[in-house]
Amino acid sequence: MKSLFLAQLVIIFQLLAVNPLFASEKTITLASGSWPPYMSSELPEYGVLSELVSRAFEEEGYRVEYGFYPWSRSMAMTRAGVSTGSLGWLKNDSREKDFFYSLPIWRTQDIIISRKDHQVHWNTVSDLKDYRIGASMGYYYGDEFQAMEKMGELDVERVMVESQNFKKLLVDRIDLMIAEKYVAQYWLEKTLLDSQIDKIKVGEIPLRDDSLYLIISRREADGAAIVESFNKGLIKLKQSGEYEKIVSKLINLNCEFC
């Protein structure tokens, strides 16, 4: 029995000698909204974006624990320092007083989806005034869109999950819906039949084209250092080719919108 205990100690010390990060691994908590295929408690590795973030942190000796909540709650938890950070956010000047921003993680586009028998023609956000618009709770669609919606100049109905908007679109309860292109593809494949997909038209002009970021609370004592470590890890992933391997799960989708 004593020899077995000594053997186990030897193994532990060998692990520490080979990988010093094993001894000093730090845990951070990230609050997240559910946004498949990027982030979800039900997906392998919690989704592609979560996997990128976890691997980047792992490169620098951090372990990530995820909690999935409504977007507004995730933001509030991070602002208050209850959660170390959150992922999948656009950069917003007004937020920088509360959060440290990482390097851009992934480029994303919001697209406009309509029915083929009721196509939408637009060049600017103002051109959408005459349409019933399906959007999602807690999502940000750009300064102009948000301002016009707040002023009541746009007819916007927000739902909790994008799949609800596909159903509303098909039964003519809305004229168009807005969704991120890979998110739209995910829900399209999950919720629609081929005959229904044939009725869908995707606009060629993106409503929004922007980057997604990790944010870390400024209430976190080591917040700046955590972001710096993440950025270093992200760069290492890109240099090693691991980044491209992970995002290929998105790029290789049979995506009609991409």
Image (cartoon, rainbow, N blue to C red):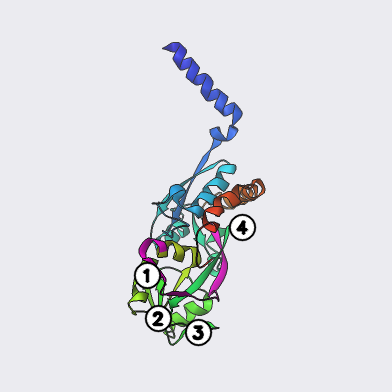
Q: Which residue is drawn at 38% across and 73% down?
A: 158
Instruction: Name the amino acid type tagged 4.
Output: Leu
Q: Which residue is drawn at 58% across and 52% down?
A: 227
- Indicate which label's residue lies in the foreground, 2 or 4: 2
* Structural distance between the alpha carbons of marks 1 and 2: 19 Å
- Going from N to C along the chain, the mark reached first, 3 or 4, is 4
Q: Residues within 10 Å of mark 3 (few under 14, many from 20)?
A: few
Q: Which residue is drawn at 44% across and 86% down?
A: 153
Question: What kind of element bears circle 1?
Answer: helix
Q: Residues within 10 Å of mark 2 (few under 14, many from 20)?
A: many
Please provide the residue range marked out in magenta: 189-216
Q: How crowded is mark 4: few (under 14 residues within 10 Å), some or many (20 or more)?
A: some
* Structural distance between the alpha carbons of marks 2 and 3: 11 Å
* Structural distance between the alpha carbons of marks 1 and 4: 41 Å
Instruction: Name the amino acid type tagged 2.
Output: Asp
User: Relative to 196, is 58 on the left or the right?
Assistant: right
Instruction: Name the amino acid type tagged 1.
Output: Ser
Instruction: Name the amino acid type tagged 3.
Output: His
Return the mark for residue 195.
1
Q: Mark 3 points at which residue?
A: 121
Task: Confirm whether the magenta stretch covers residue 250.
Answer: no
Q: Where residue 204 sits: x, y (%)? A: 54, 75
Q: Where residue 246 sits: x, y (%)? A: 55, 50
